[in-house]
Image: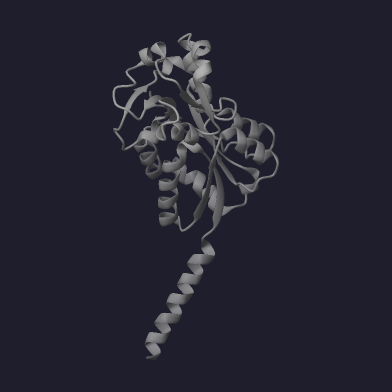
Amino acid sequence: MKRFRSIVVAAGFLLAFAEAQAAQTNVAVAANFTDAAKEIAAIFKQKTGHEAVLSFGASGQFYTQITQGAPFQVFLSADDSRPKKLVEDGLAVAGSRFTYAMGKLVLWSKSPGVVTGEGTLKAASFAKLSICNPVAAPYGLAAVETMKSLNLYDTLKPKLVEGATITQAYQFVETGNAEVGFVALSQLTGSETGSRWVVPQALYNPIRQDAVLLKTGAGNEAAGAFITFLRGSEARAVIEKYGYVLDGQS
């Protein structure tokens, strides 16, 4: 009985020690990276014991919130300009910024046969075309760049329905409020429903998605560990699974 009690006490000390070593970090994540981030965070917690508490939204909105003192320690943006500016503004740690993924834009319809390529945009036989806010969300900007590259923006502008985030742009199509929409390839991972056109990279500027350690996370063990983990092979495998291109790939 005494030996059993000793084992229980020892196990309790080990559990308490493990909990004391674990830390938590608040991570602002671009909406297009939602599913991949959730999977990465789960593996991160399993491997390190640290917890990444994720918040999802538009990169522009997160940038504004961070400049106003929002309690995030890590920022996973859908572009590279906002993390760069946070470093320049002294709100992020110099040298911590890196590209964790290269995004891909897709024109998608929930119905088979509707999207056949750029001809779908030229024919414009749909009533509504969904995009996300091009000011706050880089995928929205890429959608506008695509339409302008095809000299179709002025023609299609009256048909646009705008979501605050890429998630809302996707939901407009999913719920039938728009027949077609520009979404992120990552949102279609694991689904072959409907019809899609992966927009050629030549039609829009590369969507370089940068991560950065914020100054508020400089002394946070979990924040630093999450940034390191995001660079590692396990996270990179998840990122590729969701259709992103890794930096340095074509």
In this rendering, the count of numbered labels is 0
Image quadrant for the N terminus?
Answer: bottom left
**In the rendering, at what x and y percent does residue 168 appear?**
49, 35
Q: Is residue 104 above or below residue 121?
A: below
**Residue 112 in the figure: left or right of residue 248:** left
Q: Nearer the viewer, residue 28 or 46?
A: 28
Residue at figure coordinates x 46%, y 23% from the top left: 128
Residue at figure coordinates x 42%, y 42% from the top left: 35
Q: Is residue 159 above or below residue 12?
A: above
Image quadrant for the C terminus?
Answer: top left
**In the rendering, at what x and y percent does residue 165 appear?**
53, 34
Residue 237 picture quarter: top left
Q: Residue furthest bottom?
A: 1
Q: Nearer the viewer, residue 24 or 160?
A: 160
**Residue 135 in the figure: left or right of residue 19:** right
Q: Residue furthest top?
A: 151
Q: Nearer the viewer, residue 22 or 51?
A: 51
Residue at figure coordinates x 63%, y 39% from the top left: 92
Q: Is residue 55 above or below residue 211?
A: below
- Does any portion of residue 91 appear in the rendered image? no
**In the rendering, at what x and y percent does residue 44 appear?**
44, 51
The figure's colour scheme reads: one colour
Q: Is residue 180 above or below residue 119?
A: below
- Does any portion of residue 215 appear in the rendered image? yes
**In the rendering, at what x and y percent does residue 159 appear?**
49, 19
